[in-house]
Image (spheres, rainbow, N blue to C red):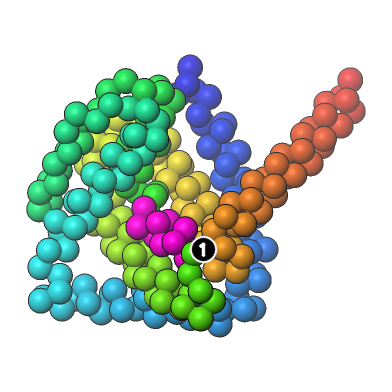
Amino acid sequence: MLRLLSFPLIILLIALGVTEIIPVVKWSIGHYIIYKWVAVGMAAYFVLSIIRIFNKNLEWLRTFSHELSHTIVGMMFLRKIHSFEAGEGEGEMSHSGGLRFGTIFISLAPYCLPIFTYLLLFLRELGAQNSLYIFDIMIGFTLAFHIGCFRSQIGTHQTDITSIGILRSYLFIFAMWIVNLTILLLSIRYGVIDAFKTLAINYYDQIVIWWKYAVRFVQSLL
């Protein structure tokens, strides 16, 4: 039942995400200068990632990030963590119990949750105005790291994805990437807390509008 219900909810999330991200991206393009330090951080990561002396532990770090994402989200859904292992290219996290509906979030967390980026977005709230550029550089760096993890780990060979269902997994990942990008762009403008508030309010308002249109449409058929 939960599997069947998840499809319309994911489609709704995609529709809300697309509706919200379009004006956000348009504004961001017109004010691209405020994202320059994020771009610097991303560029720095991609440069360092091709220099052997800096990237010799990159594969292990990607695996560690992958399993850490599973673990953090697992704890958020009240799962009991039994083990955590991260090797070079191989890792595993086992858990049990907790909230059943959290399975999709736990399984797909490494592909759609840039945990280090979000950590820095929240720490940025505590930074002085004249030091925000340092956080922005690190935010860009960690975001590029997550993109690198995504590129190297995504695929139908992953049991994380096949256990949820390939179509459902990719739709969910796509929906979450839209949400993440929207929050990131808004966070540099307002801060991450206000970004979440803005997104939640706009999503709610959009659902109310769509519901009114749906009710009117049904009434017109009666």
In the rendered image, which residue does mark 1 sit on? 125
Identify the image quadrant of residue 104. Answer: top left
- The percent position of residue 222, horizontal first and vertical second, equals 89, 20
| Point 40% across, 30% down: residue | 77
Three-letter code for the amino acid on which mark 1 is drawn: Glu
Residue 140 sits above or below residue 82 on the image: below
Specify whether residue 120 is painted magenta: yes
Specify whether residue 62 is painted magenta: no
165, 195: nearer the viewer: 195
| Point 47% across, 21% down: residue | 2
| Point 50% across, 29% down: residue | 6
Overall secondary structure of the magenta section: helix
User: Can residue 175 be spotted in the picture?
Assistant: yes
- The percent position of residue 39, horizontal first and vertical second, equals 43, 77
Q: Residue furthest top?
A: 1
169, 99: nearer the viewer: 99
- The percent position of residue 162, horizontal first and vertical second, equals 29, 34
Identify the image quadrant of residue 107. Answer: top left
Point out the stretch of residues depicted in magenta: 115-124
- The percent position of residue 80, horizontal first and vertical second, equals 28, 26
